[in-house]
């Protein structure tokens, strides 16, 4: 299934390929809980950045392993490179274009206790 998404202003656009059913990670870490981010992990080879490379701003904190990518125009993080899944991008489910018809399940991820939570994903 091919889906599209991007930031609020439309400068950053991407396409992803996924196979339903879809499971989202709902993380309670400091940045995800404040932003309401719902993680849909997509393997790098199933993600294509269509536009906006020059509009992306990078932000790192903590260990610096995750690269949070924000649109420099509207400030939305529609996808990023997570620490927990180094071979995938995390797409914000809420940034997918409407009308996709997905009915994903949600799994809590205790990002405030990252090391223990990451071990539970395996």
Image (spheres, helix red, strand yellow):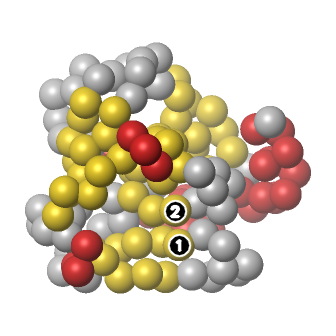
Image position of 95 with respect to 122: above or below: below
Q: Is residue 49 visible?
A: yes
- The residue positioned 69% from the left and 45% from the top of the image is 109
Left or right of 67? Residue 76 is left
Q: Secondary structure at mark 2?
A: strand
For the residues labelled 2 and 1, the Cα–Cα distance comes to 5 Å
Q: Which residue is mark 1?
A: 67
- The residue positioned 36% from the left and 65% from the top of the image is 77
Find out whether the residues at labels 2 and 1 contact each other: C-beta distance under 8 Å: yes
Q: Secondary structure at mark 1?
A: strand
Earlier residue among tags 2 and 1: 1
Q: Is residue 8 visible?
A: no
Which part of the image, by quadrant, shows the C terminus?
A: top right
| Rendering coords of residue 50 (x, y %) | 19, 57
User: In the current view of this chain or complex, which residue is farthest to the front?
Assistant: 45
**Can you tell which mark lies on residue 97?**
none
Which part of the image, by quadrant, shows the N terminus?
A: top left
**Viewer-closest of 42 and 9:** 42
**Can you tell which mark lies on residue 81?**
2
**Viewer-closest of 45 and 24:** 45
- The residue positioned 33% from the left and 59% from the top of the image is 78
| Rendering coords of residue 28 (x, y %) | 64, 55
In which image quadrant can residue 84 be found? bottom right
| Rendering coords of residue 117 (x, y %) | 80, 48
Q: Residues within 10 Å of mark 2 (few under 14, many from 20)?
A: some
| Rendering coords of residue 10 (x, y %) | 12, 62
User: In the current view of this chain or complex, which residue is farthest to the left?
Assistant: 10
């Amino acid at each position: 299934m091919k889906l599209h998404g991007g930031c609020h202003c439309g400068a950053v656009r991407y396409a992803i390929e996924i196979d339903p059913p879809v499971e989202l990670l709902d993380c309670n870490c400091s940045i995800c809980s404040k932003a309401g981010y719902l993680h849909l992990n997509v393997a790098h080879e199933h993600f294509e950045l269509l536009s906006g490379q020059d509009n992306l701003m990078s932000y790192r904190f903590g260990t610096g392993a995750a690269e949070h990518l924000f649109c420099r125009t509207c400030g939305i993080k529609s996808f990023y490179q997570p620490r927990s899944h180094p071979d995938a991008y995390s797409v914000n489910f809420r940034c997918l274009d409407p009308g996709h018809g997905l009915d994903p399940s949600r799994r809590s991820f205790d990002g405030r206790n990252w090391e223990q939570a990451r071990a539970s994903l395996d």
